Amino acid sequence: MLQKPKGTYDIYGKRALMMNYLRSVFSSLIDKYNVSYFETPMFEASELFHRGVGETTDIVSKETYDFKDRGDRDMTLRPEGTAGIVRSFIENKLYADSLPLKAWYMGPMFRYERPQAGRYREFYQIGFECFGTYDSMMDAEVISIVYNFLNLLGLKGVKVNINTLGDKESRENYHKALTDYFKPYLNDLCDDCNRRFEKNPLRILDCKVDADKGFMKNAPKMTDYLNAESKEHFMKVQEYLNIMNIEYEINPNIVRGLDYYTHTVFEVVADIKDFGSQNVLAGGGRYNNLVENIGGPSVPGVGFAIGVERLLLALEYEGLDKVQANPVSVYIFGASTQEKKYLMSLANELRSNGFKVDIDYESKSFKNNFKRADKINASFVIIIGDEEVKTNVLTIKNNKTKEEYKVKHDEIIEFLSEKLGDLDEDK
Ligand code: HAM
């Protein structure tokens, strides 16, 4: 039997309902911030990720799905959403429009990682990017969007951790301090870290292999190398977060798994007992040089992405995953050719008037049809027989109370509106 590839999953049933629910809650929230929806291709020229997202990161050096297409072009399945939107921002000259540009997305990303709970090879992100403002209001707003979204979902067990990587000057000073510090330990560092030492020593702090080695504890801290401007930017982010009553902690160990960040970085972690190691639900930050690095003008950016699977897992842990499909208003059945024609037209009419309708396609027995109506949780059942076709008077049954009514066809919309309204009020 053919099976899905390792690290992927199918979306149906409860998961499909939950994903649609997340999309709809997020899209109505993000609309309040005047943000438009944005979609970019799932694959891009490999160069985009290798140049833009960072050669020294595991995500790009070890985890991308790279392939040659039939035209011998080097392509990569997107491992994240930011780079594609930046590419589009430059290619479509969106920087020439009125800025800031605010965009959100929801879609699959691909990383060749070792699968485990909360870690997949194809996974979904809900993300947001804003181009065109250096102001720390936006750094704080980005964090607030994630915070408010999780709140709307009712998720309480989360922690917001923030940090700053400073501007270019601060980072260069910090890089120098790191290389000076790690130089005597090169023999003790893993091969990857020896490579990172040359290209981006910050990544050494993020290494899983070397994490527990004694000398890591005393490595220089970014906060000691921030220039005045970077310090002020970070202070202001905190002030804005305080004003919005957003709880957070400063965690100097957050460096993030991608190379493009400047100034504010943040992660939202699940603070739930036994949740497991993949507990970072969302991450993001500012990237003031990425647009320029990818070949565009110097325009700053800031954004985040939420891992949908991890969010779903957290909602499940907290019992917040009880979303149900909208109930079916009416189930209609009838058996003969004439009856089926009649019911088809009636179903079409009801659906056009906003009712959720399901029908019997298979001319099943009475008993089977009532079973089906229960299974799909239909509020009403309409039975089409000879009589109904002839007289245009419908037989309609409340599927819960089993009360039966006779209603003229041209009064059915009014009848259902009234009755279904009553049902809503009873809830
Ligand atoms: P990221 O931290 O690499 O950031 O990914 C964001 C989130 O995606 C993670 O916090 C996690 O929840 C989820 N995630 C990552 N890898 C996997 C995986 N293999 N399986 C399941 N979930 C996963 C970014 O991607 C940046 N583009 C975020 C950003 C936007 N920064 C600025 N703008």
Image (cartoon, grey):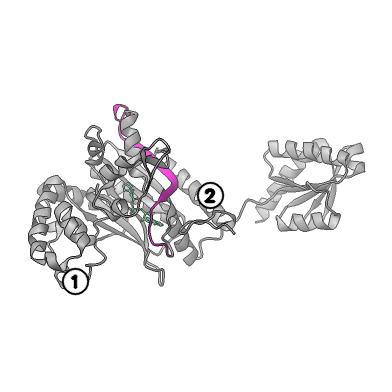
Decide if residue 272 is on the left or right side of residue 90. right
Q: Are marks 1 and 2 in contact (CB under 8 Å)?
A: no
Q: Give the percent coordinates (x, y) of residue 36.
A: 41, 37
Q: Give the percent coordinates (x, y) of residue 260.
A: 25, 47
Q: Image point 35% across, 34% down: which residue?
A: 88
Could you tell me which quadrant the N terminus lies in? bottom right
Q: Image point 52% across, 56% down: which residue?
A: 4
Out of 12 and 266, give the one closest to the viewer: 12
| Residue density around tag 2, few if under 14, some if 14–19, many if 20 or more, within 10 Å | few
The magenta region covers 94-116
User: Any atom of ligand 1 within 8 Å of the CB at mark 2?
Assistant: no
Decide if residue 170 is on the left or right side of residue 316. left
Give residue 31's mark: none
Q: Which residue is mark 2?
A: 20
Q: CA distance from mark 1 to mark 2?
A: 44 Å
Q: Which residue is mark 1?
A: 213
Decide if residue 308 is on the left or right side of residue 300. right
Could you tell me which quadrant the C terminus lies in? bottom right
Q: Give the percent coordinates (x, y) of residue 176.
A: 9, 54
Does any portion of residue 365 appear in the rendered image?
Answer: yes
Give the structural element (helix, strand or loop) at label 2. Answer: helix
